[in-house]
């Protein structure tokens, strides 16, 4: 039995572990950091140490923490009403819909709201299947579309493996155009792109174009290592979708809302898909909201056919108010352009780091969505940690993470990737600070190179 004094001396971290299941982990291995406050591009832990948030948490806090306008926007909506049934017409719904259709690529004029990115993807798949009367969905092996049953089944990420024996059927996966490690052994980005598109076309033929409802791919690759699409990849996918008559769904959950220096990554690639799924940056991470933007053809199908989708909290007024305010912040603070400019600055500085560090194999950055890929040897490209690395294969990468934390830099480290996705409000001085810590970490890891 616990004595009163034991209860009092337990840390908040331990108390959380007592009654909370944490995601993606063996619970016994965890010792979560206790965070007490967050402001701007920083957050502070219980020990009073402040961290520069170089991953915008989970690439969702796109304009940093504690923005004063966000509190007011949500509180003002609360003064009218906090919740009303999703079938109701409300001023906030009318305004946000209009704003989203203005920033979206042309013809994507209607939105269906969800609460998360995973739900947005699941519902987009449902819509594509119903609209087309076909069932197969093509996705990339190195992709992530969310953790709910359908979304994780559609993902290529190995986080789908535990449910493989009962996953959603009719997902067909293809290889990524991963030019740094091109599956077809090509030496140029263009060639890798051509091979990837030829491979995609072969798979379409093997599967039967008459069975393919849609291809779902990230607007720009994120969690799988920012496997930046070659210049013409998206254009090639759109051309194949027209040739074989399937829909394209751009998952912009991570790459949307300014990350790539455009509102949506497809705009960076100069294409218009049939649907865009979104979440994360839609509210700047302040409240949970996702959605699917659909083009006029898909929308018109559901003018005369039932739309069999719905969620209690779809179009929750408080979340819509947060999204509307977030969109205004992106515009008032010119954050989309800033992401492009600071992204260019970050890229220049990273090239200098690459020439100094043996372990810095590849830099992949689009605007402020990027990853560094670490290798044991630049010639053989042997990864610093393998694909789907187990905890005991992460020694060098854990060293990187710890050195960054010691230097007050927080970011995501996965397998052999270091993520670079700071808030779009990041300054050049803050980038310099983060890069100096990254350089220190790389110097240590260089010692383990072959
Ligand atoms: C590209 C992409 N799609 C979907 C998701 C899932 O979003 P959520 O966690 O909001 O369900 C994520 C989450 O990281 C993502 O990166």
Image: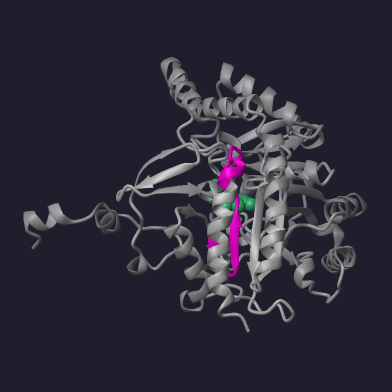
Of 263 and 432, nearer the camera is 432
Magenta stretch contains residue 424: yes
Q: In percent of the image, x 33 and y 68: which residue is there?
A: 28
Q: Residue furthest right?
A: 243
Where residue 370 sits: x, y (%)?
Answer: 66, 54
Give the quarter of the figure containing the C terminus. bottom right
Which of the pair 354/4 is nearer the observer?
354
- Residue 191 located left or right of residue 147: right
Image quarter (top left, top right, bottom left or bottom right) of the N terminus: bottom left
Q: Which residue ends up furthest to the bottom in the rendered image?
A: 450
Q: Residue at x 57, y 68 (%)?
A: 442
Residue 62, picture quadrant: top right
Q: Where residue 292 appears, x then y in whole percent?
A: 66, 39
Give the side of residue 35 with respect to residue 164, left or right. left
Residue 31 at x, y percent in the picture: 33, 62
Q: Find residue 237 and report its image quarter.
A: bottom right
Q: Which contiguous range is marked in magenta?
A: 413-430
Q: Residue at x 83, y 75 (%)?
A: 184
Along the horizontal axis of the image, is 204 left or right of 381?
Answer: right
Examine the rendered structure and indicate whether residue 95 appears above or below residue 377. above
Eyeballing the image, is 46 above or below 441? above
Quadrant in which residue 76 is drawn = top left
Q: Is residue 385 visible?
A: no
Q: Is residue 343 visible?
A: yes
Figure label count: 0
Q: Identify the image's colour scheme: rainbow, by chain, secondary structure or one colour.
A: one colour
Q: For residue 279: magenta?
A: no
Instruction: Name the spot of residue 409 as percent of width and height, x first.
Output: 48, 53
Left or right, residue 338 beside residue 445: right
Q: Is residue 222 above or below residue 335?
A: below
Task: Identify which residue, 405 or 202, lies in the foreground.
Answer: 405
């Amino acid at each position: 039995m616990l004595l009163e004094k034991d209860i009092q001396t337990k840390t908040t971290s331990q108390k959380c572990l007592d009654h909370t299941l944490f995601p993606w982990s063996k619970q016994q291995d965890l010792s979560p950091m206790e965070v007490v406050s967050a402001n701007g591009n920083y957050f502070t832990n219980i020990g009073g140490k402040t961290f520069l948030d170089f991953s915008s948490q989970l690439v969702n806090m796109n304009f940093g923490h504690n923005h004063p306008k966000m509190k007011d926007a949500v509180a003002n909506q609360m003064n009218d009403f906090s919740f009303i049934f999703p079938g109701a017409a409300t001023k906030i719904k009318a305004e946000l819909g209009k704003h989203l259709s203005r920033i979206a690529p042309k013809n994507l004029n209607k939105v269906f709201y969800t609460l998360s990115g995973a739900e947005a993807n699941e519902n987009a798949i449902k819509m594509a299947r119903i609209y087309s009367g076909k069932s197969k969905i093509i996705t990339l092996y190195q992709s992530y579309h969310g953790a709910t049953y359908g979304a994780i089944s559609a993902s290529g990420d190995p986080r789908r493996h535990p449910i493989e024996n009962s996953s959603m059927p009719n997902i067909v996966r293809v290889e990524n155009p991963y030019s740094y490690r091109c599956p077809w052994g090509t030496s140029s980005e263009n060639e890798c792109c051509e091979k990837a598109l030829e491979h995609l076309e072969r798979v379409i033929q093997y599967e039967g174009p008459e069975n393919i409802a849609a291809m779902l791919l990230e607007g720009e690759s994120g969690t799988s290592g920012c496997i930046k699409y070659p210049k013409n990849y998206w254009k090639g996918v759109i051309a194949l979708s027209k040739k074989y008559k399937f829909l394209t769904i751009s998952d912009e959950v991570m790459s949307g809302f300014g990350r790539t220096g455009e509102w949506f990554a497809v705009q960076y690639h100069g294409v218009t898909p049939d649907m865009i799924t979104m979440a994360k940056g839609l509210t700047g991470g302040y409240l949970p909201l996702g959605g699917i933007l659909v083009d006029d053809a898909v929308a018109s199908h559901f003018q005369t056919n039932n739309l069999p989708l719905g969620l209690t909290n779809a179009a929750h007024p408080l979340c819509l108010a947060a999204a509307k305010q977030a969109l205004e912040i992106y515009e008032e603070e010119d954050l989309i352009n800033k992401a492009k400019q600071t992204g260019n600055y970050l890229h220049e500085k990273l090239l200098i780091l690459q020439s100094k560090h043996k372990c810095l194999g590849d830099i992949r950055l689009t605007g402020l969505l990027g990853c560094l890929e670490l290798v044991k040897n630049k010639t053989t490209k042997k990864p610093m940690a393998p694909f789907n690395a187990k905890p005991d294969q992460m020694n060098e990468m854990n060293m990187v993470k710890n050195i960054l934390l010691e230097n007050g830099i927080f970011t995501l480290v996965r397998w052999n990737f270091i993520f670079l996705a700071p808030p779009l409000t990041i300054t050049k001085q803050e980038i310099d600070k983060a890069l100096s810590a990254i350089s220190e970490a790389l110097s240590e890891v260089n010692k383990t190179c072959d």
